[in-house]
Image (cartoon, grey):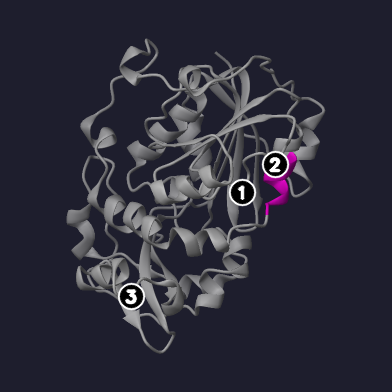
Amino acid sequence: MLKPLTQSNPLKSISSTLQFTTTSTQLTMKEIITKRSSNPDAKCSSSSVQSTPEIEKKYVHRVYDAIAPHFSATRFAKWPKVSTFLHNLPSGSVVLDAGCGNGKYLGLNPDCFFIGCDISAPLIQICSDRGHEVLVADAVNLPYRSGYGDAAISIAVLHHLSTEDRRKKAIDELVRVVKVGGHVLITVWAVEQEDGSLLNKWTPLTRKYLEEWIGPGSPRVRSASAVTLESIPETEVSVGNQEGKDCVVGSENGGGSDKQQEYFVPWHLPYHRAEVSGASAGAVENGLARKDDSKGAIVYDRYYHVFGQGELESLVSGMKNAVIVDQFYDKSNWCVILEKTS
């Protein structure tokens, strides 16, 4: 049975007992990147896991490509728990950041070597322009050989994957790419919001979006009728508030099946930041975004599957090559730290 959640500093509490394995070697991108087909440890994945569902392509990949510069401008504060985890790593550690976004954690510990990847090429370009070692890659198919890193992090990423199979696969990949004894930190948006009023500002997905999903792990549809919700002001959704609250709703396993889990969370791209005559205009025309003249913004909807208490632990509890060494709730996020055992 998993140990009870602790409200004290959980990362600090385990820092004296975790023994991180380090790597002291000169690194090249050729060494880092390997073809998945040549990896003997790679398992064959089902087509539902290998193929990206349309809802992720349209409401995750394309959205973050479109909002990348504005999104990056709002992503600068480091979460204390993530910072503690990274600073507890010994000198020489190789850290793999899967879903690195604009790279705000890359290089945070100057004594470690960081490699980031993200599905969004524009975000990766921002990271590259800042001098980071990065590449475009999918969280369910990481381009690293098995056992390469000393640690891996996945910060606010898994909730953008629309099937349970894909979420499990992403966790499998994080464990695969670290060496035995290595540690993985995962955070996801939580159903138990510190500010419960936020839930009323997100759009619950309805039956009309069923066709957007594929595979046996597809999310269950809750309601046949959509609810018209008030737009979130840009200052709430995309600046300081969201920087500290990368968090959300619902659970398929630990939190109960009666809760809404699938949401659209709006991102308001101000007109002065939007290419109104270019990409944003095309997005509006194609239905990917909409204009909100009252807010002076182009509004993009981002897909989220939100986690209930115990759901993240449930996804990793059956793994044979990793164990949970800590689990906690932080800033409306559920978080776990895994240790690879074999």
Q: Is 39 drawn above or below residue 219 in the view shown? A: above
Front label number (2 vs 3): 3
Within 10 angstroms of label 2, few (less than 14), some, or many (20 or more) residues? Answer: some
Q: Locate residue 270: give its quadrant.
A: bottom left
Give 21 or 135, whichever is nearer the viewer.
135
> Residue 224, percent across and down?
22, 69
- Residue named by callout 2: 108
Q: Tag 3 or tag 1, which sits nearer the N-term? A: 1
* Residue to which mark 1 is pinned: 104
Q: Is residue 207 visible?
A: yes
Residue 17 position within the rendered picture, expressed as x and y whole percent measured from the top left: 79, 25
Tag 2 and tag 1, C-beta contact below 8 Å: yes
Q: Quadrant of residue 4?
A: top right
Q: Position of residue 78 (x, y in %)?
A: 68, 52
Mark toward the viewer: 1 or 3? 3
Q: Nearer the viewer, residue 273 or 20?
A: 273
In the displayed orientation, state which residue is furthest to the right: 16
Q: How would you rate the neighbour count of disc 1 (Cα within 10 Å): few for under 14, some for 14-19, many for 20 or more?
A: some
Disc 2 from disc 1: Cα separation: 8 Å
User: At 38% across and 53% down in the image, what residue appears?
Assistant: 257
Q: Position of residue 318 (x, y in %)?
A: 46, 27
Query: What's under tag 1, amino acid-wise?
Result: Lys
Instruction: Tell me the amino acid under the disc marked 3.
Output: Val
Secondary-structure class at tag 2: loop
The boundaries of the magenta stretch are: 78-84
Total residue callouts = 3
Instruction: Give the distance between the C-alpha atoms of the residues marked 1 and 3, in whole angstroms.
Output: 28 Å
